[in-house]
Amino acid sequence: MKSSKDLFICLLGCLITLTGCDDLSRFSYENYNCQPRLTSLYEIRVSQPKPGAFANILYAKDQLKAEITSLTKTEIIIESESLRLVVDRKTGFTQVFKDNIYEGVSCVIDKFKM
């Protein structure tokens, strides 16, 4: 009787530990499809959401890679030489600082995690 109780407690502890781990995923991405005005920013693709990884930024006539410099549950900051993006991960609203231009852009979020 005692061993079955110990086994139950062990299994329950393992279950709680595994369900609390968000980092146990093999693959994840976040795409932000935007409606641009001034900056012609159309899409932000984040295939590895972690600091130090790179995001693909798609413009109307250009594409570039920029580094993810900060990542929290609510915000991603992506920077390159002449670009800084501050993306709200909950609403999709993106602040674009490109050269001397600032634009607030609404984006539709597409997230996948496996």
Image: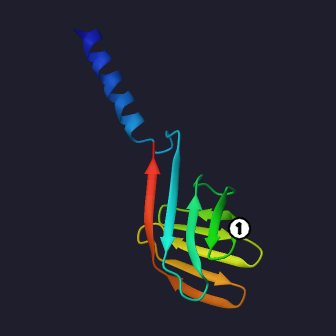
Residue 12 placed where, x, y %? 31, 28
Residue 104 placed where, x, y %? 52, 85
Residue 111 placed where, x, y %? 45, 56
Give the residue at mark 1: 64
Camera-nearest residue between 106 and 58: 58
Extreme residue in the right direction: 81
Q: In this view, does 81 lie to the left or right of 71?
A: right
The three-letter amino acid code for the residue at tag 1 is: Leu
Q: Quadrant of the C terminus?
A: top left
Residue 62 placed where, x, y %? 69, 73
Q: Quadrant of the N terminus?
A: top left
Q: In this view, does 62 lie to the left or right of 8?
A: right
- Seen at 25% across and 16% down, the residue is 5
Q: In this view, does 97 lie to the left or right of 12?
A: right
Q: Is mark 1 on a helix, strand or loop?
A: strand
Coloration of the structure image: rainbow
- Seen at 72% across and 86% down, the residue is 99
Q: In this view, does 99 lie to the left or right of 92?
A: right
Tag count: 1
Extreme residue in the front direction: 61
- Seen at 53% across and 43% down, the residue is 27
**Pointer 1: residues within 10 angstroms few (<14), some, or many (20+)?**
few
- Seen at 31% across and 16% down, the residue is 7
Q: Is residue 56 above or below residue 35?
A: above
Q: Is residue 6 above or below residue 112?
A: above
Q: In which quarter of the image is residue 21?
A: top left
Camera-nearest residue between 108 and 50: 108
Q: Quadrant of residue 6?
A: top left
